[in-house]
Image: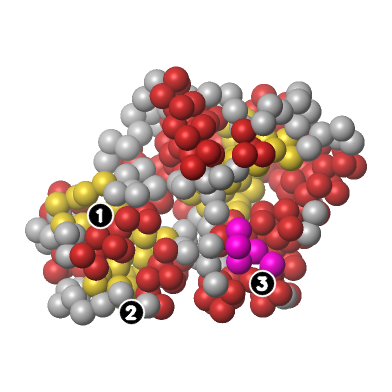
Amino acid sequence: MAVSRFAAFAVAAVIGLGLAGAATTAVADDLRIAAQPFPLYAPLFVAKQKKWLDEELAKVAPNAAVKWSLFPAGPPINESFAAGQQDVGFVGDTPALVGKAAGLDTSAIALTSDGPKSLAVIVGGDSPIASPKELKGRKVAVTKGSYAHHLLALVLEQGGLTLNDVELINLPVAEIPPAIVAGTIDAGAVWEPILTRFESQKAVRVLADGTGIKKGLLLIVADNGFLKSRPEQAKALLTAYKRASEFITANPKEAAELISGDVNLAPDLLVQVLQRMNYDPAIHDDDVAEVKKTEQFMRAHGLIKTAVDVDAFFNRKLADEAGLK
């Protein structure tokens, strides 16, 4: 996709989400953040609501402000990076690798969260499908290039199948449960908050989640030019994020009330999601190993054409300097 289309899509996403402030012109030192309004990134929204990110940024760049842009998924965030519109982005491991392989000059500077139960392959609440092997020949939806794409392949593998054994349909994640309910597809791979919202209504049920096969890693990625010129801003962001992650662990109910509107999920449902997520932003060896497996899957299935050096992609030095241990 050309950068011009990329930029147009990104602007449309911002306008569509009603973020007028995100479309304003940023000054040179402003911190531009591309995020997704999901509980998977809960500490970011806690840090926003508590003003902790503003506080940390003011310590290192008194004249800078945070410029927010929200997107419905990781791929358009890659497009916004390609258009030179972002400094930091919050994405799943799969779109992060897609962007890197496509030539984005980015690094992963921390995790946002992980939770094997935060992404799942779902079927209708009254569907007769009882195991992954029964998906053979069925219509199965996924957002192509999302981290749920990898999950779907792993779940099918449990049933002795591959992606070629199903009729794969590319849909935005928000459209997958309604399509299942309408009967136009048989199953789909989704993530939070879509998963909890529809499961709580008994409209869908989980056929298989990431337990034992995919941690559900999400990453904080940053433009390397930004990291070189303004490393202290990146560290300020990580400091605020870590503080917020610790707050969620200690106060899940209060956190749910605080950010319910940001992630579009009722507090009583949101607290359930928060309590089954790990929001530790530190980068560990097993996290890097997990992303390597994702990279191998993506090359094998043609989602990326160029290999990504995952070890080099992670900027662990910056994370260490920010105190993420």
Asked whether residue 181 is in view, the answer is yes
Q: Where on the picture, by quarter, is residue 208?
A: bottom left
Q: Residue at x 80, y 54 (%)?
A: 51
- What residue is shown with label 3? 257
- Which residue position is annotated with label 2? 202
Is residue 53 shown left or right of residue 217? Answer: right
- Between 310 and 240, the residue placed more toward the observer is 240
Residue in view at x 42 percent, y 36 percent: 98
Question: Could you tell whether 269 is left or right of 296 in the image?
Answer: right
How far separated are the C-alphas under marks 2 and 1? Answer: 19 Å
Magenta stretch holds residue 288: no
Cα gap from disc 3 to disc 1, whole angstroms: 32 Å
Residue interval drawn in magenta? 258-262
Q: Earlier in the sequence, mark 3 or mark 2?
A: 2
The amino acid type, in three-letter code, at marker 3 is Glu
> Which residue has dot 1 on it?
141
Q: Is 130 situated left or right of 189 in this image?
A: left
- Residue type at mark 1 is Ala
Name which quarter of the figure residue 32 lies in: top right
Q: Position of residue 258 (x, y in %)?
A: 69, 67
Front of the two marks 3 and 1: 3
